Image (cartoon, rainbow, N blue to C red):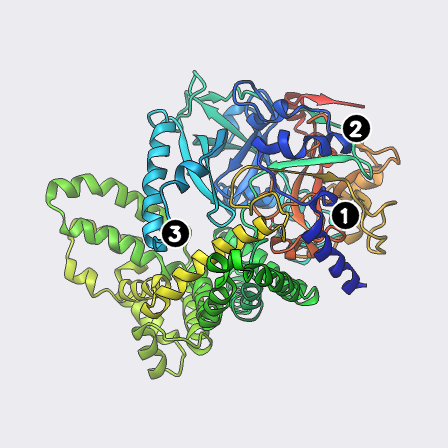
């Protein structure tokens, strides 16, 4: 069965993309040319101009990137922003204290004045985009090394940015696509005053925790609400009491008519990264070297962190957001290993590469493409051990604040110490703010433990030339770093905010240079960035060959993929509401949605992941769902669609054919994890919160009807 699916997928991927209506993360400017007819056949009623227009207001004006890594949408004329709970999570935690615990208890502002401003939070509006491939690629030629190429391209990019940023009003980003075979620029406008309006308790917003994460059937109310503020003229402004809610150009109407099987569903958002063109040996490297290290390191950090987080609510609030981030990718990477192995994805790719090589060896192609596969395979062979090492080190750097913070702060302090008094005066406020920010959520016993244990894993498993200092200490202590870490935390000024701040008063460069945490952190980061001499040529050839592989796959027709890999640029994905085969774990009539009944069925009082807030069970028993019930009288909670999305799409609006909000995307099923490398039409699903659950939670469960009154509700 699996084999058959696989052959089919390969066949279709290779020969007929038209049948893969739901595969693809499309550029808005290409919809008219590439997707319009298909989408209309499936149920779209909007014109391409109503989705993306440069001159008129369009759907795109209601879609924002949220704090760099997520997506959100504008859902009222007063700048109300809807995103996932897991996207607002770190801000909600930051705004919580053990006494006023919004993460735990939920929060609803009853007026604008009560809305809460986190330290930093921004939304990014998309203004327009355009193709600059010819302009950029006319600057390069085939005899350039990759370094030379990059330098020339960066120069041209800087010009394009300068020409389009309107004197700093806009942020302009120029990005490569198809592995550097095309370039587009994107114009954005950022708003930096974004405040928390409301959130359900974590027991709803993260219901099911890491057990249910990446799984279906699902019962999570994964949403939170923010509001964008602007100055009185609607321009971006730093936080001020005088700021007013932004009157956005467009906001999404919300429908309470609900969804059914085969309904058209489209998602606009900022998918982070896919690798659909990744070569076979790259997949092998990830499965056998990179991801196992990532998984092992993450699990270690999670276990250590959890121990301390369980000690007190205060510590839990400091670390729950980083913990969730690590846990999310821990499960994802293991899922990738399993899925890519089960589906023999590398083998599939290898077959395509064989065909490519045949094509490349034709006389007319030989010179340009003849060495492509050889160069690519050679590079991966040379870097397998390095990839494992890099992933142990990456997880160490990501989970231990004190592996990074001393070097980051310290290099600022070094500049400061070397500056004259006037310059120091200038530098001081920024450094003070940096110090303040760095130590605001730090619990030293946890930090020491994570750092020591990560170092120990790194030295015993990374199997690669390690930083000198780490080797020395490891050898002297049988790879047990506990007492070493303990003693350097005693000695270092970086173990306390006060000591670092005191350095600003008496900057002694010798003390800084000899600081043991500064040294250790510096060595680890230098190792992470190191480019060994012997890899320079193979890396250069790999980059050039990968670009040529994609060029050749497109030219030869061996791949008909007409959309570029995700890279945190705005995309549209369209598909349908689509069930999975019947599943005994889902009590809903059709396995394309779940209900509050299913939520209550999973309830485990007092459990970390499956507890419910007070009142939920009563609401269920009383069936008090009002206009948010479906035609069967149930309260719908989540639903499935077959859109092609990935991380970064979190918080994206799911829209029906009329451009009305039907839900928000928040996850994929297990099968969707491999989707970053290969799209499986049959099994891959996007998991969405039904907008009626969101509205019910706000209106009935949380008694915040004033928020629902702000929306443009249609239907029923
Ligand atoms: N898997 C989701 C994503 O990557 C994140 C879900 C967060 N929830 C959790 N239990 N960690 O977008």
Instruction: Identify the element where label 1 is drawn.
Output: helix
How far apart are the alpha carbons under marks 1 and 3? 59 Å
How far apart are the alpha carbons under marks 2 and 1? 22 Å
Q: Which residue is mark 2?
A: 257
Q: Residue at x 85, y 49 (%)?
A: 587
Number of other residues with Cα within 10 Å of mark 3, as a class: few under 14, some 14 to 19, many 20 or more: few
Q: Residue at x 61, y 43 (%)?
A: 562
Q: Which residue is mark 1?
A: 599
Q: Which residue is mark 3?
A: 142
Instruction: Identify the element where label 2 is drawn.
Output: loop
Whether the residue carrying mark 3 lies under 8 Å from ligand 1 is answered with no
Quarter of the C terminus within the rendering: top right
Q: Is residue 2 left or right of residue 285?
A: right
How far apart are the alpha carbons under marks 3 and 2? 56 Å
Quarter of the N terminus within the rendering: bottom right
Instruction: Identify the element where label 3 is drawn.
Output: loop
**Viewer-nearest of discs 2 and 1:** 2
Numbered-mark total:
3
Q: Position of residue 211 (x, y in %)?
A: 68, 58
**Viewer-nearest of discs 3 and 2:** 3
């Amino acid at each position: 069965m699996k084999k058959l699916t696989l052959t089919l997928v390969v066949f279709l991927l290779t020969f007929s993309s038209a049948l893969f209506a739901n595969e693809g993360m499309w550029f808005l400017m290409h919809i008219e040319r590439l997707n319009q007819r298909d989408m209309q056949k499936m149920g779209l009623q909007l014109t391409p101009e109503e989705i993306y227009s440069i001159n008129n207001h369009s759907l795109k004006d209601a879609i924002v990137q949220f704090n760099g890594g997520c997506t959100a949408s504008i859902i009222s004329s007063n700048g109300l922003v809807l995103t996932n709970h897991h996207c607002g999570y770190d801000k909600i935690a930051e705004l919580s204290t053990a006494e006023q615990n919004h993460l735990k208890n939920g929060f609803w502002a009853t007026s604008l004045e009560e809305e809460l401003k986190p330290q930093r939070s921004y939304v990014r509006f998309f203004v327009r985009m355009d193709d600059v491939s010819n302009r950029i690629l006319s600057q390069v030629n085939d005899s350039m090394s990759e370094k030379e190429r990059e330098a020339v391209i960066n120069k041209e990019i800087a010009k394009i940015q300068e020409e389009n940023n309107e004197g700093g009003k806009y942020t302009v980003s120029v990005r490569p696509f198809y592995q550097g075979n095309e370039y587009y620029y994107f114009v954005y406008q950022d708003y930096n005053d974004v405040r928390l309006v409301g959130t359900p308790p974590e027991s709803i917003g993260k219901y099911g925790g890491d057990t249910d994460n990446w799984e279906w059937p699902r019962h999570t109310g994964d949403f939170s609400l923010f509001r964008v503020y602007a100055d009185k003229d609607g321009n971006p402004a730093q936080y001020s009491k005088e700021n007013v809610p932004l009157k956005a150009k467009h906001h999404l109407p919300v429908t309470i008519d609900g969804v059914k099987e085969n309904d058209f569903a489209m998602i606009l958002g900022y998918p982070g990264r896919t690798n659909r063109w990744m070569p076979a040996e790259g997949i092998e490297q990830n499965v056998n070297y990179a991801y196992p290290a990532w998984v092992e390191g993450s699990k270690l950090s999670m276990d250590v962190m959890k121990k301390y987080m369980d000690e007190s609510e205060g510590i839990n609030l400091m670390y729950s957001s980083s913990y969730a981030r690590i846990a999310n990718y821990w499960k994802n990477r293991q899922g990738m290993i399993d899925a890519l192995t089960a589906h023999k994805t590398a083998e599939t790719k290898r077959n395509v590469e064989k065909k490519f090589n045949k094509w490349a060896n034709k006389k007319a192609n030989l010179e340009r493409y003849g060495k492509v596969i050889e160069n690519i395979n050679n590079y991966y062979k040379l870097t397998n051990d390095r990839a494992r090492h890099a992933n142990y080190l990456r997880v160490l750097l990501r989970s231990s604040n004190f592996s990074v913070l001393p070097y980051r702060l310290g290099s600022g302090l070094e500049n400061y110490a070397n500056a004259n008094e006037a310059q120091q005066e200038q530098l001081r406020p920024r450094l003070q703010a940096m110090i303040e920010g760095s130590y605001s959520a730090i619990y030293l016993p946890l930090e020491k433990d994570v750092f020591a244990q990560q170092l120990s894993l790194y030295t015993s498993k990374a199997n690669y030339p390690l930083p000198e200092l780490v080797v020395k200490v490891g050898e002297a202590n049988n790879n047990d770093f506990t007492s070493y870490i303990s003693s350097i935390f005693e000695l270092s000024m970086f173990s306390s905010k006060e000591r670092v701040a005191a350095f600003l008063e008496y900057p002694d460069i010798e003390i800084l240079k000899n600081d043991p945490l500064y040294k250790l952190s510096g060595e680890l980061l230098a190792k992470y960035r190191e480019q060994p001499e012997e890899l320079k040529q193979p890396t250069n050839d790999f980059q050039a060959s990968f670009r040529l592989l994609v060029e050749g796959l497109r030219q030869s027709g061996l791949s008909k993929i007409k959309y570029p890999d995700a890279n945190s640029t705005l995309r549209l994905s369209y598909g349908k509401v689509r069930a999975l085969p019947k599943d005994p774990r889902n009590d809903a009539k059709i396995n394309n949605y779940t209900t509050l009944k299913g939520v209550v069925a999973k309830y485990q009082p007092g459990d970390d992941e499956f507890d419910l807030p007070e009142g939920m069970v009563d609401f269920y028993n009383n069936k008090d769902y009002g206009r948010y019930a479906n035609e069967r009288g149930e309260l719908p909670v989540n639903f499935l669609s077959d859109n092609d999305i990935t991380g970064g799409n979190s918080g994206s609006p799911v829209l029906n054919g009329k451009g009305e909000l039907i839900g928000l995307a928040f996850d994929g099923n297990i099968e969707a994890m491999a989707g970053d490398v290969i799209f499986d039409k049959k099994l891959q699903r996007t998991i969405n919160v039904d907008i009626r659950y969101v509205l019910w939670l706000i209106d009935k469960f949380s008694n915040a009807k004033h928020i629902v009154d702000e929306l443009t509700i249609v239907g029923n």
